[in-house]
Image (cartoon, rainbow, N blue to C red):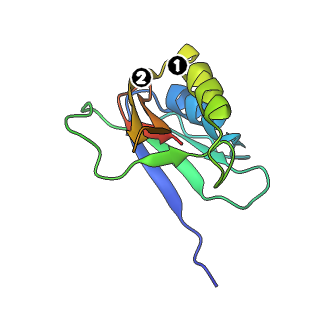
């Protein structure tokens, strides 16, 4: 049996970052979570991990050592769906870093969330 776990983000503005990631992942605010210095979102189907956002005084300083890959179509690569979601997230404050191709074939888009955390839409 797997052990439940939570992914935690440091943040300058936990509520804004939680809102961004809720859209990116199809998550909802965690019921009953009420902390002015934090926010938490959960998978409405109860399958994925909870994600918390904790206020910290310092900003992001270096490249992430761990990052999230958002896969809008699961294991199947659908370039149109990937680009559609990347565009929606850019409209909500993400910044495009670039894209990856392997042997000339599109793979994924690299973005930064509103606080500079790198992630991929793959």
Task: For the N terminus, give its image quadrant.
Answer: bottom right
Image coords of residue 101 (percent x, y): 41, 38
Q: Which mark is residue 90?
A: 1
Image coords of residue 76 (percent x, y): 66, 51
Q: Secondary structure at mark 2?
A: strand
Q: State the residue in front, 25 or 44.
A: 25
Q: Is residue 30 above or below residue 22?
A: below
Closer to the chain start, of discs 2 and 1, is 1
Residue at x-position 54% and y-position 42%: 122
Residue 82 as seen in the image, left or right of residue 65: right
CB of mark 2 within 8 Å of CB of mark 1?
Answer: yes
The residue most toward the top is 91
Q: Which mark is residue 96?
A: 2
Residue at x-position 24% and y-position 40%: 63
Q: Is residue 67 above or below residue 5?
A: above
Image coords of residue 46 (percent x, y): 75, 59
């Amino acid at each position: 049996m797997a052990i439940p776990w939570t992914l935690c983000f440091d943040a300058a503005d936990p509520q804004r970052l939680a809102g961004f990631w809720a859209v990116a992942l199809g998550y909802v605010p965690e019921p009953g979570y009420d902390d002015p210095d934090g926010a938490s979102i959960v998978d409405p189907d109860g399958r994925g991990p909870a994600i918390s956002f904790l206020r910290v005084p310092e900003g992001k300083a270096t490249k992430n050592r761990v990052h999230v890959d958002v896969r809008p179509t699961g294991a199947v690569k659908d370039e149109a769906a990937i680009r559609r979601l990347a565009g929606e997230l850019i409209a909500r404050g993400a910044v495009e870093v670039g894209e990856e191709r392997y042997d000339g074939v599109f793979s994924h888009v690299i973005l930064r969330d509103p606080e500079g955390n790198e992630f991929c839409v793959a």
